[in-house]
């Protein structure tokens, strides 16, 4: 089991591993509370997400859907259906900048769960693969609980599943009687309730330095989360260069190629981490300028950090500024 302890302030800290990363949770509890039970609640919620939505697990629901025979309808578990609902909602609202069917293209370039090397594929192969993608190909029935396999369609929910995992863990903790908690899964955060001293949960927006983007040079930004969530996307984690062009793991489903000039980091605050996660990806795909305009026009709380020859440049929407701690 991961780390567990309770501070004098009545906050327990839990931790563990999931989805190839780490999770942590800070929960407001009485000192006598069974932390092992709370740890199990969070871990079980995250294990459920993996069992349903991990493209790395051959036995997951999402992997079995990919292998399903053409023309068959596949029953979806409740959580899977919830995430797919949100994914298609953001896909439509973003004009396809977010697309849960982009998996074959991601794998073709070497970023996915396959063992392909990072590479720029041949144009003919790209065109053939792209023809098998497109969120408009997704057909459902039975209130979204059954999904048609039209042939060659593969889903990839990795840009939304970690956020949903944080949401689901928070929901389960609330159902278990925990009045306040902050759950973080691989950088995606869901917080509800207030700390024992009555204050809001506060988090520092991701600002760790790296070789290409000294984000830490920017002023620290602290968010106060009042029953809200925060997620960060960008190209600092996975990218490669080919003939002088930097390609990130953030794919533009509209063009079928990786984003070549993605923002270093895009942070979104939303009512749940599932939507924050998806919108952070969509805005990253749009690019810093177009993404900022879109976020402002649609009232999204977003922060963009971009590279320039003079160092990192930050831009925030008015909605994002309203979440900054005083």
Image (cartoon, rainbow, N blue to C red):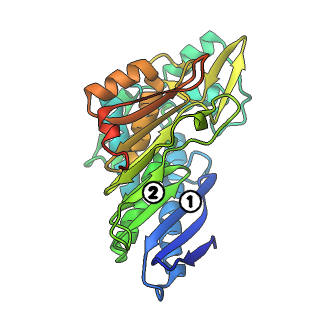
Quickly name the residue at label 1: 23
Instruction: Find the distance from the CA under tag 1 to the CA under tag 2.
Output: 9 Å
- Disc 1 is placed on an element classified as strand
Which one is in front, 133 or 169?
169
| Residue 87 on image: x %, y % | 38, 39
Q: Are marks 1 and 2 in contact (CB under 8 Å)?
A: yes
| Residue 13 on image: x %, y % | 54, 71
| Residue 270 on image: x %, y % | 34, 45
Q: Earlier in the sequence, mark 1 or mark 2?
A: 1
| Residue 234 on image: x %, y % | 54, 32
- Disc 2 is placed on an element classified as helix
Quickly name the residue at label 2: 166
Q: Quadrant of the N terminus?
A: bottom right
Q: Quadrant of residue 227?
A: bottom left
| In this view, 278 is above or below 182 | above
| In this view, 13 is above or below 95 | below
């Amino acid at each position: 089991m991961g780390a567990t302890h309770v501070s004098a302030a009545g906050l327990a800290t839990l931790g563990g591993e999931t989805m190839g990363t780490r999770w942590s949770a800070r929960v407001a509890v009485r000192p006598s509370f069974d932390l092992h039970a709370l740890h199990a609640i969070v871990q079980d919620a995250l294990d459920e997400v993996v069992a349903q939505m991990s493209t790395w697990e051959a036995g997951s629901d999402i992997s079995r859907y990919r292998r399903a025979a053409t023309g068959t309808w596949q029953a979806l578990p409740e959580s899977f259906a919830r995430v797919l609902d949100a994914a298609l909602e953001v896909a439509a609202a973003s004009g396809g900048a977010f697309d849960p069917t982009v998996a074959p293209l991601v794998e073709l370039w070497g970023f996915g769960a396959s063992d392909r090397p990072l590479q720029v594929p041949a144009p003919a192969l790209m065109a053939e693969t792209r023809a098998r993608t497109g969120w408009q190909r997704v057909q459902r029935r039975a209130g979204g609980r059954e999904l048609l396999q039209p042939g060659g369609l593969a889903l990839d929910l990795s840009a939304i599943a970690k956020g949903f995992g944080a949401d689901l863990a928070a929901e389960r903790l609330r159902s278990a009687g925990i009045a306040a908690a902050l759950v973080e899964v691989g950088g995606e955060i869901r917080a509800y309730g207030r700390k024992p001293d009555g204050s809001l949960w506060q988090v520092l927006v991701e600002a760790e330095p790296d070789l290409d983007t000294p984000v830490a040079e920017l002023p620290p930004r602290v968010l106060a989360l009042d029953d809200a969530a925060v997620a960060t996307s960008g190209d600092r984690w996975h990218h490669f260069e080919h003939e002088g062009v930097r390609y990130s793991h953030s794919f533009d489903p509209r063009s079928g190629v990786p984003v070549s000039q993605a923002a270093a980091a895009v942070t979104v605050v939303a009512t749940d981490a599932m939507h924050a996660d998806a919108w952070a990806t969509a805005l990253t795909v749009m690019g810093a300028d177009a993404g900022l305009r879109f976020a402002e026009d649609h009232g999204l709380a977003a922060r963009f950090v971009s590279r320039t020859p003079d160092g990192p440049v930050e831009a925030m929407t008015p909605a994002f500024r309203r979440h900054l701690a005083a």
